[in-house]
Image (tube, helix red, strand yellow):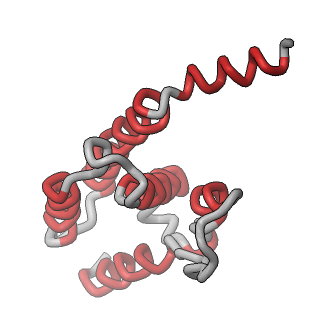
Amino acid sequence: QDLETEDLTAAALMSSLSLEGSLSTKSLGVGSEYHEWGSYFTLKATMLPMSYIPVKIAEKILFIGKAVRILCHPIAKADNALTSEELEAFTKALRILQNMPKFNLTLFTNAIESIRQRVAEKLLDLVVKKSDLVSHLMSIKQYFLL
């Protein structure tokens, strides 16, 4: 495939990860967390360039976007938030791939997986460890078993 087709494919990739939703003027309230994670951003598989980006990889990209949004939110504690150095490293890895003359799915998949692992670790640390999720779940369990 020629370079022009690859450029169009890259543009299609960016638009296929359709970020639907709009910023609400309502203050954050009960249920807004679900909206933030569950339905604010969606993936339109029909818009994916399937010959370049499998749905599984697109889902990982969507997860990364959601996790980065949560980890960069002011509510995330400073030690859990993604640092500017980490964000720059993610950007640099993707820019290197963007500047390659041909799209390489293996390298792209490896870069996405590396980024996904890092943000998943940060999210795990925030949700399970720092927020003491297990303790909260045990409290709920004890309450319902009274």
Lateral position of residue 144 relative to residue 124, left or right: right
Residue at 44% x, 52% y is 67
Q: Position of residue 79 (x, y in %)?
A: 26, 42
Q: Nearer the viewer, residue 113 or 22?
A: 22
Q: Which residue appears at 14% of the width and 62% of the height? A: 92
| Number of numbered discs | 0
Q: In this view, does 142 lie above or below 120?
A: above
Q: Which of 11 and 25 is in front in this view?
A: 25
Confirm whether residue 37 shows in the render.
yes
Q: Position of residue 93 (x, y in %)?
A: 18, 57
Question: In the image, residue 99 lies at what x, y percent?
Answer: 14, 72
Residue 118 sits in which quadrant?
top left
Which of the 4 image quadrants contains residue 138? Answer: top right
| Quarter of the figure with the N terminus | bottom left
Question: Which residue lies at the image location 61% right of the left edge and 70% below the top edge?
Answer: 44
Left or right relative to 29: residue 101: left
Q: Of residues 137 and 122, which is closer to you in this image?
A: 137
Above/below status of 4 relative to 83: below
Locate the C terminus by quadrant.
top right
In this picture, residue 21 sits left or right of residue 95: right
The residue that appears at 39% across and 50% down in the rendered structure is 76
